[in-house]
Amino acid sequence: MGEKKKKIIKTIKVDVDKCNGCRACEVICSAFHAEPKYSSNNPARSRVRVVRHPLRDIYVPVYAGDYAPAECMGRDQYTIDGKEYEECAFCRASCPSRDAFKEPDSGLPLKCDMCESDPYLSEPMCVQWCLNDALLYETREEEVEEDEIEQQEEVEIGLESLANKYGLQKVLDAVSRMSKKD
Ligand code: SF4
Ligand code: SF4
C-alpha cells in the first residue's frame, strides 16, 4: 500500500432551477480561452453549453467532459417533471455523433479545465459570471494513494509529450483506432 496524499476535488454544482438561459457562462468561457485571452467570444468554443428551449422552459448548463472516439450504441432521452429533453442532452462527451464540445475550426475536442490556466482565480469564470447563482463552486480535500496520483501524472506527461511530438489529432486518432480493436 502506498502512502496517502491529499487531493483537491473541485466541483461546480448546477442548480438548473436558477438558470434562465442567459448564456453568460458560454460567452465568458469562450473569451477566457481565446488566443489571445479575451480577444474574441464565440459560444461554439465554450466548454459549457446551455441546452436551451425557452418555449418549454428548458435551460440546462452542461460541462464538456472527456473525448469519446466512438458514439454510443444507444441514446439516452430523459423526461423530468413532464419536460422531455432531447437525445444526449446531458451527455458531456465530445463524440463523433454531434458538433457539441468541438473546436469549430479544427474539430478538436473541448473539455472544461476548471479555468486552471489562471491559478489566481478565486472561482472559475463561468461561476463568476452567472448572476443567477445557478453555478456554485466548491472544493474539498480527499485522501488518495500516492501511487494513484503518480500514475495519473505519468499518463498525462506521456500523452502531452506524444501530442507535442505528433500533434493532438494524431494521438486522438491512434486512441480511437485502439479502442475500436478492444
Ligand atoms: S450564466 Fe448562469 S443563468 Fe446564465 S445560462 Fe449560464 S448557468 Fe444559466
Ligand atoms: S470552469 Fe472554466 S473552462 Fe470550465 S466551463 Fe467554466 S469557464 Fe469554461
Image: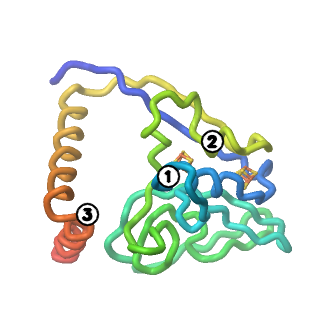
In the rendering, which numbered label is found on residue 33?
Answer: 1
Q: Residue at x 46, y 55 (%)?
A: 35
Mark before the other along the chain sequence, 2 or 3: 2
Foreground pick, 44 / 112? 44
In the rendering, which numbered label is found on residue 168?
Answer: 3
Q: Position of residue 9 (x, y in %)?
A: 45, 32
The N terminus sits in image quarter = top left
Mark before the other along the chain sequence, 1 or 3: 1
Foreground pick, 62 / 25? 25
Name the residue type under label 2: Lys
Provide the secondary structure element on which disc 3 rests: helix
Task: Answer few, some or many: residues within 10 Å of disc 1's Cα (few below 14, many 20 plus, some between 14 and 19).
Answer: some
Mark before the other along the chain sequence, 1 or 2: 2
The C terminus sits in image quarter = bottom left
In the rendering, which numbered label is found on residue 13?
Answer: 2
In the rendering, which numbered label is found on residue 106?
Answer: none
Indicate which label's residue lies in the foreground, 1 or 3. 1
Foreground pick, 81 / 24? 24
In the depicted structure, whether residue 2 falls above or below residue 65:
above
Q: How is the image coloured?
A: rainbow
Provide the secondary structure element on which disc 1 rests: loop
Q: Is mark 3 within 8 Å of ligand 2?
A: no
Q: Is mark 1 within 8 Å of ligand 2?
A: yes
